[in-house]
Amino acid sequence: MVAKQIDYTRTCLADTSGAILPWELLGLVFLCIFGDTPVTDQSNKPSLPPESSLKPGPAQKQQAPQPNPWVEGLQTIVLSVFLALGIRHFVAEARYIPSGSMEPTLQINDRLVIEKISYHLNPPEHGDVVVFWPPDSLTVLGKRRDAFIKRIIGLPGDVVEVRDGEVIRNGEVLTEPYIKAAPDYQWGPEEVPEASYLVLGDNRNSSYDSHAWGFVPQENIIGKAVVRFWPPDRLGLLDD
């Protein structure tokens, strides 16, 4: 048997400053960095009595303590870091593509935004491109665990088979305009277990995915790839 060369596809962390976030979140970060400045309506200012009628009193002689700029700067930095970490952990993060297992949909060095909210409201669907932690059986103890990115082909309860260059799900042949080439391997049929997903790379013949190592537990899914923000000439939603 000739061993087939497999492309170990994973996504790596990118600079979160490149992520495209909702305007509300950007406004919140802007507010935390620059502070909120009160606005005075000049048309509603009460008229002041003549200067000669103002007599200095004890309260007028006292000056309010001046804030320490170093303390204010430190507070701003801490709050900004706290917000950035919170956004990255709960809302969205940026990732980049280091290999070609999702070609032609995703190219090497593409930068993506992975959102993490929608799957708390609705389960994943057929065709979603997801980022996930690989099963424990693929993680070498003591080594860094890298996330994978693939397309969801099978939901819990689906029966999936790969045969004669086609993917068959629940007895129906899938139409897949997004793949690079028809798969040249046979797999299944197998039923996707409960709370698990079957994922395949769009570059079917050069992807280390469910046909090689099995199903993805639901709790391993990090989020859904929704936007490509780099390179600029390919910027847009992945659903387009």
Image (cartoon, rainbow, N blue to C red):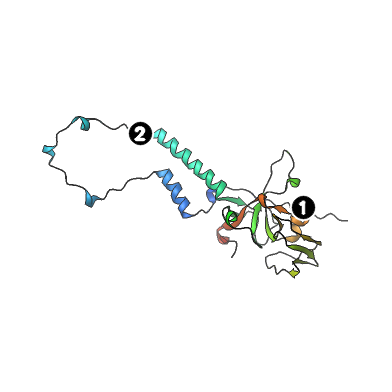
Q: Nearer the viewer, residue 142 or 116?
A: 116
Query: For mark 2, does the 10 Å Cα neighbourhood hold few (<14), some (14 to 19), or many (20 or more) residues?
Result: few
Quadrant, the C terminus: bottom right
Quadrant, the N terminus: bottom right
Q: Nearer the viewer, residue 36 or 178?
A: 36
The spot of residue 172 in percent (x, y) is: 74, 70
Q: Amino acid at mark 2?
A: Pro
**Residue 15 vertical position relative to residue 73 in the rendered view, above or below:** below
Give the residue number, with chain letter if any, for mark 2.
67
Q: Tag 2's secondary structure? A: loop
Q: Residue at x 46, y 51 (%)?
A: 26
**Residue 239 vertical position relative to residue 141 in the rendered view, above or below:** below
Q: Tag 1's secondary structure? A: helix
Q: Amino acid at mark 1?
A: Trp
Report whether 127 appears left or right of 25: right
Q: Residue at x 16, y 44 (%)?
A: 48
Q: Is residue 230 visible?
A: no
Report whether 24 appears left or right of 152: left
Q: Are marks 1 and 2 in contact (CB under 8 Å)?
A: no
Residue 156 location, quadrant? bottom right
Report whether 128 appears left or right of 56: right
Give the residue number, with chain letter if any, for mark 1.
213
The spot of residue 212 in percent (x, y) is: 78, 54
Q: Residue at x 13, y 39 (%)?
A: 51
Find the distance from the CA under tag 1 to the CA under tag 2: 60 Å
Q: Nearer the viewer, residue 165 or 4?
A: 165
Q: Is residue 62 visible?
A: yes
Question: Mark 2 or mark 1, which is nearer the start of the sequence?
Answer: 2
Indicate which label's residue lies in the foreground, 1 or 2.
Answer: 1
Q: Which mark, by number, is residue 17?
A: none
**Residue 79 vertical position relative to residue 209 in the rendered view, above or below:** above
Query: For mark 1, does the 10 Å Cα neighbourhood hold few (<14), some (14 to 19), or many (20 or more) residues?
Result: few
